[in-house]
Image (cartoon, coloured by chain):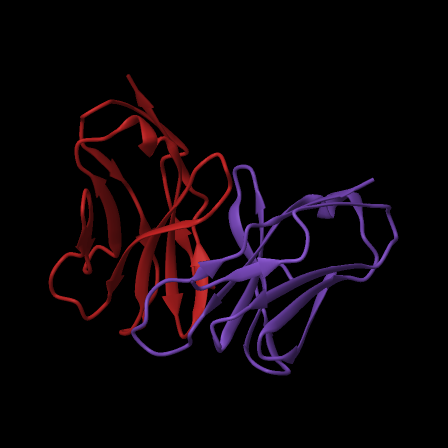
Chain colours: A purple, B red
Amino acid sequence: DVKVTQSSRYLVKRTGEKVFLECVQDMDHENMFWYRQDPGLGLRLIYFSYDVKMKEKGDIPEGYSVSREKKERFSLILESASTNQTSMYLCASTPGVTGVTEAFFGQGTRLTVV
Amino acid sequence: AQKITQTQPGMFVQEKEAVTLDCTYDTSDQSYGLFWYKQPSSGEMIFLIYQGSYDEQNATEGRYSLNFQKARKSANLVISASQLGDSAMYFCAENRDDKIIFGKGTRLHILP
């Protein structure tokens, strides 16, 4: 059974803290994604990675960075958490093969910054 | 930048009726893919259906079909014979060059 696993379902952090959100996939997928989901705004792409150590900015990268040292793991880093980063964060992966279909999602991490 | 537009923030539909959820995209590329996902209140993202830009036939998966009109750049989701369990958020998405962008979603309410 294919799986994308996010390390935490719920997180509460203080303003200014450095926050790590971890995502692991066991499908040997090339591409991995981080989105944030807010009511009325849908899923917005923060960063994606198409290979180890490779990354590209999405639509809202400000305040975030990412790390992909191993193919199966893609980390989202909030260098200095702020209250406007309170959100649901979703990780996804795709095989990266042309014509292949769906993205596989993790269960989401609901982050609250206080 | 890629843009996916879902013009219906919310819809109310009577059970057993058919539903059409709108989606338009703005790519000028020749090769791309379009998806629909369902997100129930539990929060999980459930893949429903996929349409490739070169597919000549509209995609179908059970009660779901995708009304693909390439010239109009639209990829509407049609749910036939709606059920109470269809109440959820629905997201349209585009995969272009491995980058996947989502629309803002439509919240569908099925009324008994």
Q: Is residue A112 left or right of residue A94?
A: right
Q: Is residue A93 left or right of residue B95?
A: right
- The image shows residue A36 at horizontal and vertical percentages of 60, 51
Give the residue drawn at x 71%, y 44%: A86
Q: The C terminus of chain B is located in which quarter?
A: top left
Residue B7, picture quadrant: top left
In this view, the residue farthest toward the left is B57
- The image shows residue B32 at horizontal and vertical percentages of 31, 69
Give the residue drawn at x 21%, y 55%: B72
Q: Nearer the viewer, residue B58 or A72?
A: A72
- The image shows residue B26 at horizontal and vertical percentages of 35, 59
Q: Is residue A73 left or right of residue B54?
A: right
- The image shows residue A82 at horizontal and vertical percentages of 80, 48
Give the residue drawn at x 33%, y 56%: B35
Give the residue drawn at x 55%, y 50%: A107
Please indicate, yes or no, whether residue B72 appears anywhere in the rendered image.
yes
In this view, the residue farthest toward the top is B112
Say above or below: B109 vs A20.
above
Please indicate, yes or no, whether residue A59 appears anywhere in the rendered image.
no
Say above or below: B48 vs B2.
above
Q: Is residue A61 left or right of residue A39?
A: right
